[in-house]
Amino acid sequence: MKFVDEFRDPQRVKQWVQAIQEITTQPWTIMEVCGGQTHSIIKHGLDQLLPESINLIHGPGCPVCVTPIAYIDKALSIAQEEDVILCSFGDMLRVPGSQDDLLSLKSLGADIRIVYSPLDALVLAEQNPDKKIVFFAVGFETTAPTCAMAVYQAKQRGLTNFYMLACHVRVPPVMQALLDAPDNTVQGFLGAGHVCSIMGYHEYPPISAQYQIPIVVTGFEPVDILQGLFLCIQQLERGEASVENQYKRVVTEQGNLPAQQLMKEVYQVLDRQWRGLGNIAQSGFALSDEYAAWNAEMHFSVADIQSNESRECRSGEILKGLIKPAQCPAFNTRCTPEHPLGATMVSSEGACAAYYHYRRYQND
Amino acid sequence: MCLAVPGKILSMTDADALSRMGRIDFAGVVKEVSLAYVPEAEIGDYVIVHAGFAISVLDQEEAKQSLLAFAEMDAQED
Amino acid sequence: MTDKTLNCPLPLHYEHIVMAHGGGGRLMQQLLDDYIQPVFNNPLLAAKNDSAVFDVPAGKMAFTTDSYVVNPLFFPGGDIGKLAVCGTLNDLAMSGAKPLYLSCSLILEEGFSLQKLKQILNSMQQVATAAGVAIVTGDTKVVEHGKADGVYINTAGVGVLETALVINVQAIQAGDVIIVSGDLGRHGLAVMLERDGFEFEHNIQSDCADLSGLVQDLLQAGIDIHCMRDLTRGGLASTLIELASHAGLCFELQQAAIPVQDNVRSLCEILGFDPLYIANEGCFALCVPAHHAEKTLALMQQHRLGKQATIIGTVKQEVERGYVSLISEFGIARVLDLFSGEQLPRIC
């Protein structure tokens, strides 16, 4: 694939690894914010190419991992209602709620469909006027505008059988929450490239300045990640702290204005609970009041659903980078992808699942 | 991660900006996606596609720049 | 002689399956005589005995069975009939057997189109003819509308081992070379795209094919095959993990050597799949001693189904617990693990 394969070229990877080795003189702890970057790092083994003094922490940028359990339970409850077709991205189907997951509910007969795009759910709504189509809208700022368009179109077309269970989250507040934590160890960030393609990175300079921390907006291919790390380490070594953009081919400073505009139209910003991390102020998007008629939380009686997470799951500490998955006593014993205690073991990008699949036999 | 991949615009519909769709070629696989968020996109452009939407037009000159070897990049910046 | 007991005309010509097609009466006889016998056409089946009786050569035989429940029944590159014959022929071939006879059990859903059934039976016979095997016995059951998904097929097969080789997991040795016969991931994707929509324009065809001829070529050329497996459910990765674990050996694979078509690779990027875990129906992996590797490759590449045959790895030393290690393009090893279930399309 053009613009993918070039960024996986072993020769280029080797050059950037060497460049990183040459500038690194002391230990640094860097967090890649986005789960997609984690996936790429683990799958390609990039962390094993780095100097041992570079410690990578896998951040909370995985909607599967951080979507609060209450929303999984809400989706499960709605899916069991009469005449409902619940549509979801494939990612959410194995995420455990308090009792169950969507996949096992599907096996018991609930009409749960995997869609590739939120617009596919809209088509289903038009094709099935006698059914209620509920779209489970999760994800960060990259995905939020795609869901926003679905509900916007539903309003435009006057569709009355389409509902959205919206639980979107925002990246900058969680970065700040991590930096505010007294036990924070993160010294530099690789910013989430695709989130920034929508939002730009004008929100980052104040964070970088306030906490004196480098933030490098970074892509997802091996060459991207190594370049991002290089720029971040270069700043750390020089004692600098600024915002840089490695992913210039996709990301501009102001981001995608039409997408931002539609999000403003459809969503309101509010406080949001993060699985494992707790409540973070102004960290989520929910449907605005003008879209109440399409809000699944208004239409179905799920507002009161309270949910409890497993007490044994330490995904919060893992998402903050305080412990590695293998340091959790439940890892690979009481918590496996077949029987996950928390979402970080489910998501293909979750730190625990990534370690389970790729590192279980090694001693780190 | 926000799984998003680059593809090339083969054709597009004439609809208004928010309803515009394009056929995108991903190295032999073609998919119709929404171009609502890339009003500036033209046929032949590469776009980054996520969940059925083009979210950004790929800047090919910048792509070329980031593929330069470390030494060349250094030289250009100086 | 006229039949005076019947007053009402019987509606004998249905376009679809009705319960009576499985009821043991005239309609069932008609189904067998008009649809099944003429297609599978062979003396053993025509004898209409409860079981097919045939001579066997001295030596060892292989015997296998499999049920086929694919949705949709027709997909790019094949249908459930082709799959049901290829799958069982391949299972026989993987133990080194030359397939001889197959059985065919049909579970039909009331309302299923007889036209489609005919098409499926024709596909079965087409593969059987090409493979030189006969479908010599079978059974037909009909279930009520809504109790099945059109048609389910079970085939069993017997074959004869003309080789003295013992081809199984215990025969794999450290130092063996691992070869894969073709590119990966086409069947699983072709079926999934046909079923789940997602509306991609693509030309991905299932690789569904009978591998027994290719395997016989290798055996007749005297290749010392240690083990073979077709890479069906769970794909290359799951199959090799199972083998390595049973063998108590480490399989080391080179990522860059594993053949995957460009369009399969693209779709995997878009949907977040790993082609190593996608099902194939016309592709197998085999372990041969290193000194036979080149000859094996040359022979395979001469065959229509082995043109893409490639060495993808080697069997390393014995270990306490067998595993598969994949070396990335950057020289980094990672251990492949079984997925908990089918891969689901993802956006993250």
Image (cartoon, coloured by chain):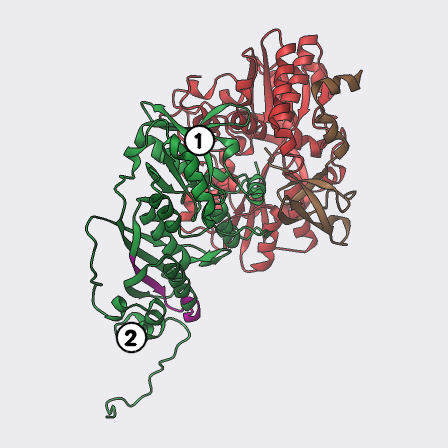
Chain colours: A red, B brown, C green
Residue A47: say if magenta.
no
Quarter of the rendering occupied by the N terminus of chain A: top right
Residue A98 is at least partly visible in this image: no
The residue pinned by badge 2 equals: C29
The disc placed on residue C313 is 1
Residue C113: say if magenta.
yes
- Picture quadrant of residue C141: bottom left
Query: Chain under label 2?
Result: C
- Picture quadrant of residue C100: bottom left
| Label 2: few (<14), some (14–19) or many (≥20) C-alpha neighbours in 10 Å | some
Horizontally, is B9 left or right of C138 in the view?
A: right
| Near-viewer residue (C295 or C109) | C295
Question: Is A241 placed above or below A202 here?
Answer: above
- Picture quadrant of residue A193: top right
Residue at image coords 25%, 42%: C164
Q: Secondary structure at mark 1?
A: strand
Question: Is A61 placed above or below B78 here?
Answer: below
Horizontally, is C68 left or right of A11 in the view?
A: left
- Residue C51 percent across, percent down from the top left: 21, 63
